[in-house]
Structures are given as structure tokens and as C-alpha cells.
Image (tube, rainbow, N blue to C red):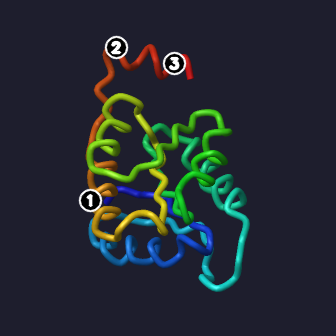
Amino acid sequence: MKKIYISSDHAGYKLKEQIKNKFSKKYDFNDLGTMNSKKSVNYPDYAHKLCKKVGNSQKNMGILICGSGMGMSMAANRHKKIRAAVCYSVKNTKLSRLHNNANIITLGARLTKKNTAFKCIEIFINTKFEGGRHKKRIKKI
């Protein structure tokens, strides 16, 4: 079973729980918080916590969820070895893996429908990096 790190702020808490429930038989989630949907929290704290785990190995992947997906992405992309992509469609999710070798998907709970988020998660986890001409570009990041 593939291990996936997952984290959210208060705005993403509900979608995080729905993702874990939907995919719990397929993937082993390591939930890094928040554990309380009602208490307002600072999204960078949760992004940084997850990035430390994902950055430790090329095999690790992560899911970050906040209201728009943007804040988590901005905080995550400050870390070395992290390529976090805001995903909102099947196509941009697939390309984030094929061409950019993203290792973290960020989702906007207030902007992305649950079923779209589920599709994006499946594609993100199961799409392999193409390499080739994209590899040299990734090295420049």
C-alpha cells in the first residue's frame, strides 16, 4: 500500500477527511493535521510539516488542502526538493506529474468539487514522470 502524507488547514479539513475515507483501502495516509475543523489555524505550519516528510525521499508524495490551494502551494514551494502543484482539473493534474514531476498536490476545498478532487488525487498518485526533455528543466528548479 502506497504511503501518502496529507495535511490541511481548517478550510480544507472536511475535504481531507473525505479523501481519507474514499481512499483508505487503497492508500496509507499519514495525517499531519489539522485535527480540528472548527479552530482557525495557519496553513503554512501544516505545509511546512508535510514538506519536511515529503522532501526526505523521492518516493514520498503529499496532499495539501486549504481554501484555494494557493496558500499551501506557496508555502510548500519554498522548500528544497518540493514541487507542489495547485490542481483543479484532470488535465492540469496529469501534466503536473508528467512534465513537472510534482510530488505534492494542493487542492482548494472552496473551489474544487469533491468528485473532481477525488479524480485529481487518483491521477496524481498514478501518473509517472515522463522524464526526457522535462528532466533537465526540473533540475533548473
Where disc 2 sits, the SS reads: helix
Label 3 and label 1: CA atoms lie apart by: 28 Å
- Between 111 and 17, the residue placed more toward the observer is 111
Q: In the rendered image of this protein, does residue 15 appear above or below residue 89?
A: below
Residue toward you, 1 or 99: 99
- Across and down, in percent, residue 43 comes to 67, 62
Q: Which mark is residue 133?
A: 2
Q: Is the residue under label 3 in contact with that under label 2 (CB below 8 Å)? A: no
User: How far apart, in angstroms, are the residues tagged by discs 1 and 2?
Assistant: 27 Å
- 50 relative position to 131: left or right: right
Q: Nearer the viewer, residue 9 or 35?
A: 9
Q: In the image, what residue type sits under mark 2? A: Arg
Give the residue number, with chain letter if any, for mark 1.
Answer: 119
Residue 111 image-quadrant placement: bottom left
Q: Amino acid at mark 3?
A: Lys
- Left or right placement of residue 45 versus residue 36 in this view: right
Residue 60: x and y in percent read 46, 47
